[in-house]
Structures are given as C-alpha cells and as structure tokens.
Image (tube, rainbow, N blue to C red):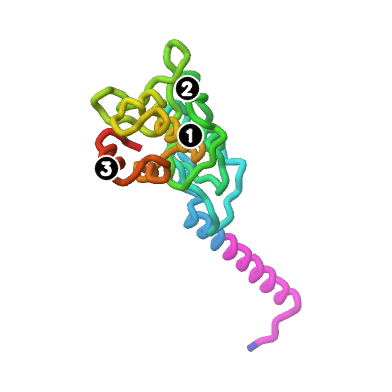
C-alpha cells in the first residue's frame, strides 16, 4: 500500500469530517420529524410558533377550530395557553368572539379550542347543538344553556363553566366527574344531552 502524502491525508480528513457533519444533521432532522416538528401545525401557512419544543419532552397537540384564520391541529409546548393556540392558528377572524373563551386558560393535550362567531348584536353565537332537543356542546355552552338540562342546576352549571374556563375546555364528558355535585348516576343521564 503506497504512502499517502500530508496533503492527501488532510483532504481525506476534511472529507471524513464533512461526511460526519452531514450524517449528524440528517439524523437530527429525522428525529425532529419523528417527534412531530414537521407535520403537525404546519398546515395553512401558519407562522412558526414562538416556542421551541424539546425532543421527547412534554409537548401538547391541540385542535384549533372555529373563527380562526388557519384552523387545524397544532403542536405547542407544555404550559401553553389558549391564546397561544389561537395565535398559532393565525389569530381570529373579524367575525370571531374571542371573549367567548378563556384565552388565559392552560391547554391540555388533545384539547379542542373553538373560537365562536359573534352574533349580530355583539355576543357569541350559540355553538352547534344548542337547539333545545339536540345535544349541548360543553365547549361553548353558557350557564343558561346548561341549566336547561335536567340534573344540572344553576350552581352546577356555573361550576361546569368555571371548570371549563380554568382547564381551557373539556375534551370529554367524563371530565364532569371532577366537578362537585355530579356523580356517576347523573353523568349517565347527561350523556345523551351533552357533547364535548
């Protein structure tokens, strides 16, 4: 085997370092895509979040719907607030009633954030299923709407709305079990009248 000159060794060494750097970059991009940095939250041309998620740690996936510019599913960091999800979805549309939801509430993984449209008089329009005979949406229902359901009085209705606002929404009817005054028997009776 012939001896390599010093110049050849330097060239081969530089090529080896370049290949190592390219390989490391490729591995990192594969890890980022696997962790969800590429697909979730990129739809609709939304701007990048001001948060950086750490690989393998504590991110949330939330669905932002209703009167936002880019509705969709977005990945946010643990501890994010409803306002962060709305901003990530491009902000509200001119038809939105952002005061109908608690923008300061912390988000939970798998939560849906629905920004309701404003009514012609300036209030929020009742959400889907607000008809008297249909299911009532826990995500947008008012105390008055919840009070119309048999088994829920005005105090419990207020507790449900307060719990929903504190936790940034309700993703399941089963979460009502956390509220004082609602037991298993009442929850079974309410399943036909409520939807998350």
**Residue 11 rendering spot, x and y as whole percentages:** 69, 71
Say which mark, if any, is on residue 162: 1
Which badge, 3 or 2, comes first in the chain's sequence? 2
Instruction: State the image coordinates of residue 179 (x, y, percent, origin top left).
Output: 42, 42
Choose mark 3 or mark 2, whichever is in front.
3
Q: Earlier in the sequence, mark 1 or mark 2?
A: 2
Neighbourhood count class around disc 1 (C-alpha, 10 Å): few under 14, some 14–19, many 20 upward? some
Disc with the residue nearer the chain's start (3 vs 1) = 1
Q: Which residues are magenta?
A: 2-25
Position of the C terminus by quadrant: top left
Residue of label 2: 96
Q: Residue at x 43, y 21 (%)?
A: 117
Q: Secondary structure at mark 1?
A: helix
Identify the residue under disc 3: 188
Cα distance between the residues tagged 1 and 2? 21 Å
Assign the N terminus to one quadrant of the image. Answer: bottom right
Crowding around mark 3 (Cα neighbors within 10 Å: few <14, some 14 to 19, many 20+) is: few
Q: Residue 71 at x, y = what percent?
A: 44, 33
Q: Is residue 184 above or below residue 101?
A: below
Q: Position of residue 163 (x, y in %)?
A: 47, 38
Using the numbered discs, state the Cα–Cα distance from disc 3 to disc 1 in whole angstroms. 21 Å
> Does residue 28 appear in the picture of this structure?
yes
User: Quick check: 149 above or below 118?
Assistant: below
Q: How many marks?
A: 3
Q: CA distance from mark 3 to mark 2?
A: 34 Å
User: Which label was assigned to residue 99?
Assistant: none
Q: Relative to the observer, which residue lies in front, 106 or 181?
A: 181
**Can residue 64 be seen in this snapshot?**
no
Mark 3: which secondary structure?
A: helix
């Amino acid at each position: 085997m012939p001896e390599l000159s010093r110049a050849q060794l330097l060239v081969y060494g530089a090529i080896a370092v370049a290949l190592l750097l390219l390989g490391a970059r490729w591995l990192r991009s594969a890890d980022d895509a696997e962790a969800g940095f590429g697909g979730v939250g990129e739809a609709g041309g939304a701007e990048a979040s001001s948060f950086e998620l750490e690989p393998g740690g504590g991110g949330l996936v939330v669905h932002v719907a209703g009167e936002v510019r880019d509705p969709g599913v977005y990945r946010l960091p643990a501890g994010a607030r409803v306002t962060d999800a709305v901003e990530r979805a491009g902000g509200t549309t001119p038809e939105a009633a952002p005061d109908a939801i608690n923008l300061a509430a912390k988000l939970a993984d798998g939560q849906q954030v629905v920004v309701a449209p404003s009514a012609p008089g300036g209030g929020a329009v009742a959400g889907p299923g607000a008809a008297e005979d249909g299911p009532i949406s826990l995500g947008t229902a008012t105390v008055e709407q919840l009070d119309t359901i048999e088994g829920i009085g005005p105090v419990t209705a207020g507790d449900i709305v307060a719990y929903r606002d504190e936790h940034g929404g309700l993703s399941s009817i089963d979460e009502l079990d956390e509220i004082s005054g609602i037991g298993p028997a009442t929850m079974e009776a309410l399943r036909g009248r409520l939807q998350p």
